[in-house]
Amino acid sequence: SYVLTQPPSVSVAPGQTARITCGGNNIGSKSVHWYQQKPGQAPVLVVYDDSDRPSGIPERFSGSNSGNTATLTISRVEAGDEADYYCQVWDSSSDHRGWVFGGGTKLTVL
Amino acid sequence: EVQLVESGGGLVQPGGSLRLSCAASGFTFSSYEMNWVRQAPGKGLEWVSYISSSGSTIYYADSVKGRFTISRDNAKNSLYLQMNSLRAEDTAVYYCARVGLVRGEGDYWGQGTLVTVSS
């Protein structure tokens, strides 16, 4: 089945830019979605279809996807952005159909 | 306002059964595909099962295939997960998630219900 690889952790100072990567075989051919999850809360969709933002999500959150890597970029990072972030795709291979999640990346705001 | 409210979690012994429910409101439930996703304590998200809007297409993760059954009742705006032969490794918070209409994204999630499998 399809595998998504994320770095376990990313650290950034307030006001700087955080980039969280999601690696997968030819992931550029898939639609990638990103979720933010704060402790004790349900995941929240922050970017869908590689680079679109749901209503209510700040413009500071953006996404890109090409080749074997998708990236979630958070500009002007704030303390409130500290959370776990997960990438997700729909796997439609012959041996597995369903959502696939990356292992998650913990964003620490220094 | 879209709302998804899970219920039915609790403590169950290994080998036991549990039925989770997800009550949907604020949207036309029968028009949306749905998923169950779980998260073991301190771990990442794991997809469990998918069901199409009509209920005619269903998929399961290998880890639960043959033990879990997803279903829905569109007349009652409800999603279900029947869990049998439960194991310690099934201990997790279980979320129901709506599949968005764009490219299969999980656009709304419930708050989750905790299932603990322990003797």
Image (cartoon, coloured by chain):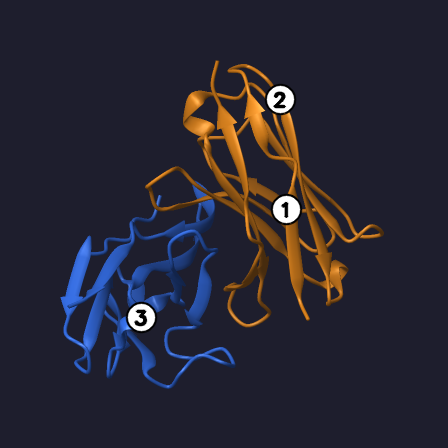
Are marks 1 and 2 in one subunit? yes
Amino acid type for the residue under numbered disc 3: Asp
Mark 2 lies on a secondary structure that is: loop
Q: Which residue has dot 1 on it?
A: B6
Question: Residue B43 placed where, x, y %?
Answer: 33, 42
From the viewer's perspective, is residue B78 above or below residue A12?
A: above
Give the spatial CA distance, label 3 vs label 1: 26 Å
Amino acid type for the residue under numbered disc 2: Ser
Whether residue A23 is visible, yes or no, is no
Q: Which residue has dot 3 on it?
A: A81
Mark 1 lies on a secondary structure that is: strand
Quarter of the image where one finds residue A65 = bottom left
Q: Residue B17: which disc?
A: 2
Q: Which chain carries label 2?
A: B
Sequence-wise, the earlier of marks 1 and 2 is: 1
Whether residue A17 is visible, yes or no, is yes
Give the colour in which the image draws chain B. Answer: orange
Q: Mark 3 lies on which chain?
A: A
Give the colour in which the image draws chain A. Answer: blue
